[in-house]
Image (spheres, rainbow, N blue to C red):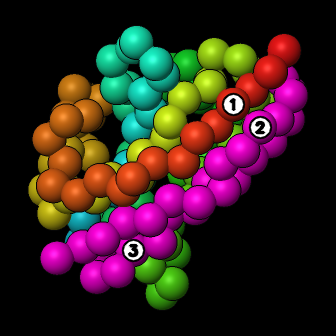
Amino acid sequence: QVQLAESGGGSVQAGGSLTLSCSASGLINNACLGWFRQAPGKEREGVAVIDTVQGRPQYADSVMGRFTISQDSAKNTLSLQMNSLEPADTAMYYCAADRRRGFCNSEAWASYKYKYTYFGQGTQVTVSS
């Protein structure tokens, strides 16, 4: 059983930065890890994922070049560095994990947004203009 706990959310002005962290109880090696977000009244969307074995990240076009996903296997943590934040980034951000690494390595990685076995409770990010 894996439990995920996000932290690091908050309120910032446009152009600012935040770093989200996800702490996992239970091993998250040999897995697909990701960050997803959901704004009020909108569908959940994929932000970034990473295969813990291959270490190759994938990003949504909307965050490419601004966000960086990283993992620390020794500390059992997943991070999301968010720079140049925009009001459109305002959402609840969720950490996710699944043993099916194929989720991370598919071109359709974002379509698995509801299929991950483990999700955290979320952390709110609010960006004001």
Marks 1/3: CA distance?
24 Å
Circle 3 sits in a helix, a strand or a loop, which is it?
strand
Q: Residue 102 or 129: which is nearer the viewer?
A: 129
Name the secondary structure under disc 1.
strand
Q: Mark 1 or mark 2, which has the lower sequence index? A: 2
Mark drawn on residue 11: 2
Q: Is residue 35 at all visible to an observer of this figure? A: no
- The image position of residue 33, as x and y in percent, is 34, 56
Q: Is residue 91 left or right of residue 16?
A: left
The residue that label 1 is drawn on is 126
Whole-percent x, y for residue 82 in the image: 69, 42
> Which mark is first along the chain, 2 or 3?
2
- Amino acid type, mark 3: Ala
Report x, y in % for residue 64.
Answer: 59, 28
Magenta segment main secondary structure: strand
Is 61 in front, or is 125?
A: 125
**Local SS, label 2:** strand
* Magenta residues (range): 1-28
Up/down of 83 relative to 9, above or below: above
